[in-house]
C-alpha cells in the first residue's frame, strides 16, 4: 500500500475542520472515517501491480560522454486500467533521465517508456528495481510493487586521443614506403635499389648492384609488417592516483593509460602489426588475444571498460610470466605503469632482464603536471618549500628513468594530455629505426 500527498493534504484540512468547527472526538472520528473510506475505495479499485509484465530493450553499450537509450515495455494483463507512477532506478553515475514517469495502461494493452542514460563513469551500469505505484480513482492511496528487470549498459572508454591519429597515420604512410630507411635494422626488410645521392649512408651501398650499373646503387629498407605488440596495463596501486585532478570526477592514471593504449593499438593495426592486451596486478584482469584488425578496437574498449585500479602492490614476477606466455617470440612490450622509485627498484627492475633479453620494452608513465607547476613556484616562502619538494620528486623520477634506460628500456614520461601522442611517436621512431 502507498499513501499520496493528497491524503496528507486532506488530513491537514480535516484537522482544521475538527479544530475550528467540530472540536470533539466525534468530529475527529468522522474525519478519520471519511479518509479511511477514501483509502479503502482507492485500494479496492486500483489496478494490481504484481502481475505486470515488464521487458527491456535498447542499447547495451555507449562511449563515455555519449547517451544510450533503454526502453521499458509495460504490459497490463489485468482487468483494470493502470494509472500511476513508475520509477526506473539506476545508479547515480548512469545519469538516467527521467527517473519517474507517469503511467496509464488500459487492460490488455502495453506502453513503452524510454530512459536516456548518460554515464559519468566508465564501466558497467546495472539497472536496479522498477517500482510501480497504481493509484485509485480518488488519488489518495494505491498499490505499490517492485519488479526486477535486469539490464546492463557498459560505458566504454572515450578514446579522446583519436584526434592524434590522422597526423600519426600520415607519418606512418611516409615511413611505410614514401620515405624508406637506408640502414637495415632488426625490424626492416629489403625494399628496393636506387641511385646514391649526397648524404646517403655509405653502409647502404650495394656493391654488387653498383658493379652491374653505371652509378653507385644503394639499398632501401622498409619496416617489417606483422610484428607483435603487447600492451600491458598495470592495474595495481600506482594506477589509482588521480594526476592533476581538481575534482573527484577526474579519472585515475589508469584511464590515461587506456587512452594511450587505444591510440597505439589503432596506429599499430594500420601499420600491419598484431596487437594484444594484458591487464594485470596480482591476477589477469583483462586479456585480448588474436583479434583481427577490424575487431581489435571494439575488443579492447569492451575489455578495458570494467577495469578498476586494485589497491594492492603489483606482482611483477607474475606479470612477467604472463607477458612471456603471451609473447613467445620477439615483440614490442609497452608497459603502462608508474615511475615511483620504490615499486620500480624493488619490483620492476629485478624482473626486466627476462623481458629485455628477447623483447623490445617501452615503459610509459603518467607525469603529474601539478608537480611541475609546484617546481616553478616562487611566490612566497611556502611556495619555495613546495618547489623544493617538487624538484626532489622530479629528480627521483629522472633517476628512475635513467635506471630503466641503462637496462635497455625506452621510457616515455609525459603528462596526461601528452602521453598518448608521445607513446605513438615512440612506436613510430622504433619503426623508423628498424628496432621493431
Image: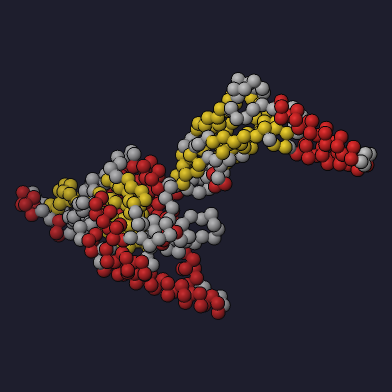
* In the foreground, 257 or 137: 137
Percent position of residue 221, x then y = 19, 50
Quadrant where the C terminus sits is bottom left
Left or right: residue 185 versus residue 64 is left
Quadrant assignment, res 257: bottom left
Left or right: residue 77 versus residue 136 is left
* In the foreground, 269 or 135: 135
Percent position of residue 17, x then y = 90, 39
**Residue in the image at 29% along x and 51% along y:** 230
In the rendered image, the residue lying farthest to the right is 21
**Residue in the image at 51% along x and 60% along y:** 245
Percent position of residue 163, x then y = 43, 48
Specify the color scheme: secondary structure
* In the foreground, 251 or 286: 286
Left or right: residue 385 versus residue 41 is left
Quadrant where the N terminus sits is top right
Observer able to see residue 144: yes
Percent position of residue 116, x then y = 56, 37
Q: Compared with residue 133, is residue 211 higher up or lower down, i.e. above or below? A: below
* In the foreground, 82 or 19: 19
Q: Compared with residue 12, is residue 423 higher up or lower down, i.e. above or below? A: below
Left or right: residue 274 versus residue 374 is left
Observer able to see residue 195: no
**Residue in the image at 46% along x and 61% along y:** 241
**Residue in the image at 12% along x and 52% along y:** 217
Q: How many marks?
A: 0
In the rendered image, the residue lying farthest to the front is 25
Quadrant assignment, res 37: top right
Amino acid at each position: 500500500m502507498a499513501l499520496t500527498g493528497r491524503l496528507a493534504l486532506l488530513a491537514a484540512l480535516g484537522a482544521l475542520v475538527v479544530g475550528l468547527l467540530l472540536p470533539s472526538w466525534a468530529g475527529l472520528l468522522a474525519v478519520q472515517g471519511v479518509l479511511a473510506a477514501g483509502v479503502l475505495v482507492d485500494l479496492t479499485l486500483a489496478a494490481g501491480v504484481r502481475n505486470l509484465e515488464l521487458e527491456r530493450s535498447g542499447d547495451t553499450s555507449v562511449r563515455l560522454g555519449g547517451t544510450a537509450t533503454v526502453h521499458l515495455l509495460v504490459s497490463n494483463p489485468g482487468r483494470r486500467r493502470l494509472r500511476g507512477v513508475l520509477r526506473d532506478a539506476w545508479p547515480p553515475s548512469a545519469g538516467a533521465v527521467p527517473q519517474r514517469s507517469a503511467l496509464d495502461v488500459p487492460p490488455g494493452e502495453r506502453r513503452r517508456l524510454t530512459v536516456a542514460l548518460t554515464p559519468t563513469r566508465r564501466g558497467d551500469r546495472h539497472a536496479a528495481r522498477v517500482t510501480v505505484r497504481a493509484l485509485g480513482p480518488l488519488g489518495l492511496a494505491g498499490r505499490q510493487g517492485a519488479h526486477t528487470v535486469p539490464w546492463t549498459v557498459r560505458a566504454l572508454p572515450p578514446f579522446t586521443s583519436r584526434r592524434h591519429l590522422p597526423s600519426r597515420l600520415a607519418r606512418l604512410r611516409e615511413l611505410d614506403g614514401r620515405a624508406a630507411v637506408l640502414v637495415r635494422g632488426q625490424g626492416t626488410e629489403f625494399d628496393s635499389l636506387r641511385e646514391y645521392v649526397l648524404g646517403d649512408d655509405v653502409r647502404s651501398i650495394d656493391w654488387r648492384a653498383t658493379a652491374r650499373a653505371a652509378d653507385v646503387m644503394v639499398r632501401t629498407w622498409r619496416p617489417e609488417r606483422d610484428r607483435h605488440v603487447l600492451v600491458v596495463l598495470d592495474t595495481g596501486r600506482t594506477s589509482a592516483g588521480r594526476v592533476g585532478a581538481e575534482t573527484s570526477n577526474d579519472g585515475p592514471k589508469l584511464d590515461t593509460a587506456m587512452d594511450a593504449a587505444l591510440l597505439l593499438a589503432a596506429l599499430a593495426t594500420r601499420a600491419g602489426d598484431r596487437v594484444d592486451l594484458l591487464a594485470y596486478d596480482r591476477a589477469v584482469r583483462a586479456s585480448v588475444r588474436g583479434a583481427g584488425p577490424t575487431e581489435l578496437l571494439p575488443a579492447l574498449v569492451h575489455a578495458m571498460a570494467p577495469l578498476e585500479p586494485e589497491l594492492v602492490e603489483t606482482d611483477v614476477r607474475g606479470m612477467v610470466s604472463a607477458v612471456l606466455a603471451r609473447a613467445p617470440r620477439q615483440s614490442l612490450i609497452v608497459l603502462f605503469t608508474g615511475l615511483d622509485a620504490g615499486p620500480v627498484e624493488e619490483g620492476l627492475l629485478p624482473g626486466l632482464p627476462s623481458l629485455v633479453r628477447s623483447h623490445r620494452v617501452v615503459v610509459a608513465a603518467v607525469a603529474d603536471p601539478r608537480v611541475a607547476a609546484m617546481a616553478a613556484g616562487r611566490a612566497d616562502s611556502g611556495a619555495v618549500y613546495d618547489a623544493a619538494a617538487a624538484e626532489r620528486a622530479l629528480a627521483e623520477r629522472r633517476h628512475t628513468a635513467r635506471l630503466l634506460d641503462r637496462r635497455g628500456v625506452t621510457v616515455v614520461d609525459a603528462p596526461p594530455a601528452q602521453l598518448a601522442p608521445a607513446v605513438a611517436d615512440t612506436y613510430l621512431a622504433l619503426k623508423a629505426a628498424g628496432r621493431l
